[in-house]
Amino acid sequence: MRNTLSFRMILLCIFLFPQLHSCVDDEAEYLARQNFAPDQSFTESFDTANAAYNRGWRYLNKSVDIGTTTWQNPPSPPFGPFSSTSTNNGYLWADYNSTSSAAGIISNWAVSPTLIMKNGDKIAFYTRAQLYFFNDDSTDFTNRLQVRLNKINADLNVGDGTDEGDFGVTLLDINPFYRDFSYNAFTSGDPDVRFAYPHRWTRFEVLVSGLDKPVTGRFALRYFVEGAGNNGRATAIGIDELTYTSAK
């Protein structure tokens, strides 16, 4: 009886050991990916849009209807760059001519190079809007920017119009309620102005989150304005001194 019991115990151990070992291996692999994903940190000053393109950035205008402007260095700088080391137009820029509609949809994307991303990675950048003089006031006619994440793959499917394609994760949305900036409202102390797109270079920072494990994918800056165009919202915005910092 005892011999039979011992034999059964041995068989049980032989059966369970590979299963337990497999679980341990899976956990170790997962922890290794979490703790030892390669450092992906970089800085992009966008001193020239072409140089950034050569480093893996991609510019995709999916506005409705598509206009003449994609992300580029401004042809005649509306304002100086944030970085003191940049040339006068050394920043990334897009404007309301991203759509050819009088009041259409701007969906203009600057997509990062392919990265191995994990929770806690940090994206930081400086941005500001351009002010136009209109009706005895300076205004931005309302601007908006999103930072979006593609955690599915490293493809460039950014959808069309309001569709965000594979970039389904919103990490940051600047001015989602479409507050407009006007200088008169600013000087009079209108509290809504503080929610508008910044009219001076302002730093924004966001953490990558919502990932089950490190993934190979991309993030994107999306100039996204509904009801935009030459008879609607939007002026122009700039992006400068972007950094991506891998979590330790």
Image (tube, rainbow, N blue to C red):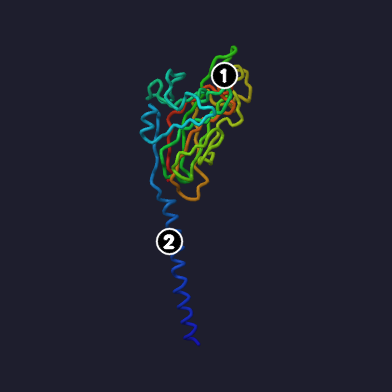
Residue 200 visible? The answer is no
Residue 53 sits in which quadrant? top left
Q: Residue at x 61, y 26 (%)?
A: 179
The location of residue 151, given as percent across then percent down, is 48, 44
Relative horizontal placement of residue 64, taking residue 116 as reference (left or right): right
Look at 52% across and 25% down and name the residue there. Answer: 99
Q: Amino acid at mark 2?
A: Asp
Name the residue that disc number 1 marks: 139
Residues packed near mark 1 inside 10 Å, few (<14), some (14 to 19) or many (20 plus) = many
Residue at disc 1, secondary structure: strand
Image-quadrant location for residue 180 = top right
Where is residue 229 drawn, in percent x and y?
55, 22
Who's the residue at 48% across and 75% down the image?
Answer: 12
Compared to 31, does 102 lie above or below? above
Name of the residue lying farthest toward the top = 136
Residue tagged 2 = 25
Above or below 67: residue 112:
below
Identify the secondary structure beneath mark 2.
helix
Q: Nearer the viewer, residue 12 or 62?
A: 62
Q: Which numbered disc, 2 or 1, marks the residue that appears first in the sequence?
A: 2
Q: Residue 248, image x and y in percent?
A: 42, 46
Pointer 2 with pointer 1, Cβ within 8 A = no
Give amino acid for label 1. Answer: Thr
Distance from label 2 to label 1 (Cα)?
59 Å
Extreme residue toward the bottom, this view: 1
Image coordinates for residue 82, horizontal then vertical, percent:
44, 25
